Amino acid sequence: MKKNFSQPILFLSVFSLTVVMLWVYLSIQRALTKSEKPILTPQQTKILTPKFDQSVLEELKKRKF
Amino acid sequence: MNLQNIQFNSRYARYRPSTFKLQRIMQSKRNQSFAWLSLTILTVCFFLIVAIRPTLVTIAKLNKEIKDLSEANQKLQTKINTIVEAQNEFAKYSDDLFLLDQAVPDNSDFPRLVYFLEQSTVNEGVELKSLNLDRIGVAEKTAKEATASAIQTLNFSITASGDYLRLVNLLQDLESSRRILRLGSTSFTLTKKDKDSAYELLVAFSGQSSFGKAPAEKHNQ
């Protein structure tokens, strides 16, 4: 019986190419989405609200010391 | 030389059938195409794994880093703007900020507090019967302790005698002092020193005065 080995090797090659392509795609996706560590701490990103309640000072001025 | 060739041929003679078979397979045009195609695909796979994937991953990582850093830069710029605004606000009220230190001093400053309490009784014309202050530590606290209990309280209790209106005025004076005093339970009692003497109105109350620095965390913001 005559066996042809070329065809299975070709299928195997195509399958390998598909797997490698998928692996490359997933690696790129992972690199694009995953952050290793946050650059800024929550404390650094906390926004200040620089409003001073002047009425407190006015109230304190009226009080005795 | 001939002897060497004979030895070589005899050593690899057992592989000769496979070689012939491979040659026979490769004689077909179709098989040749399949073989070359397979070889090409495997070469592409090899370069994808060894060269292209690491390069693309590095590019993706750098892109992500640039994006993250741009976002961080934007957030920091916003924070810088608010800090500048806060600095302007601070400069605007810097002349009056001593009032806050007087309201809640950094340390207990109990001599000044005692003087203030005594002066208030004198000003209102009531007699100060007793003045008790809780014991407070004067030793420097460690940084950890200071953070844990940033604002502390100094408890005091006073007993004074006088007429009702003066005693009420004394309480009002203390409540409206610049140093923040929190008055607790207050009780008025009418007592007699001895059988022959007149009745005497006493007021007893306790209070708290806060002192200490704001937590370090707040300073860092």
Image (cartoon, coloured by chain):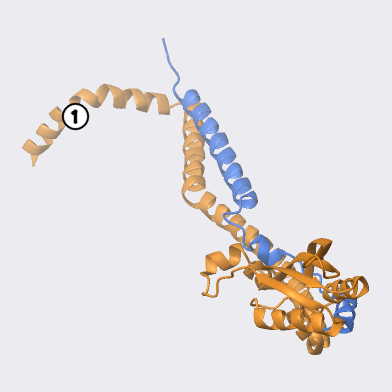
- Asked if residue B36 is positioned above or below residue B21 in the image, the reply reads below
Image coordinates of residue A28 in percent, x first then y, are: 60, 48
Query: Can you say which quadrant of the picture contains the N terminus of chain B?
Result: top left
Colour chosen for chain B: orange
Location of mark 1 (residue): B12
Q: Nearer the viewer, residue B42 or B178?
A: B178
Q: Residue at x 81, y 64 (%)?
A: B191
Structural crowding at the residue carrying mark 1, measured as other residues with C-alpha within 10 Å and reported as few (<14), some (14–19) or many (≥20): few
- Asked if residue B8 is positioned above or below residue B61 in the image, the reply reads above
Chain of the residue under label 1: B
Image coordinates of residue B31 in percent, x first then y, are: 48, 27
Q: Residue at x 76, y 79 (%)?
A: B117
Colour chosen for chain A: blue
Q: Nearer the viewer, residue A30 or A19?
A: A30
Residue B40 visible, this orientation? yes
Q: Nearer the viewer, residue B56 or B178?
A: B178
What amino acid is found at the position of numbered circle 1 in the picture? Tyr
As drawn, is B42 to the left or to the right of B8? right
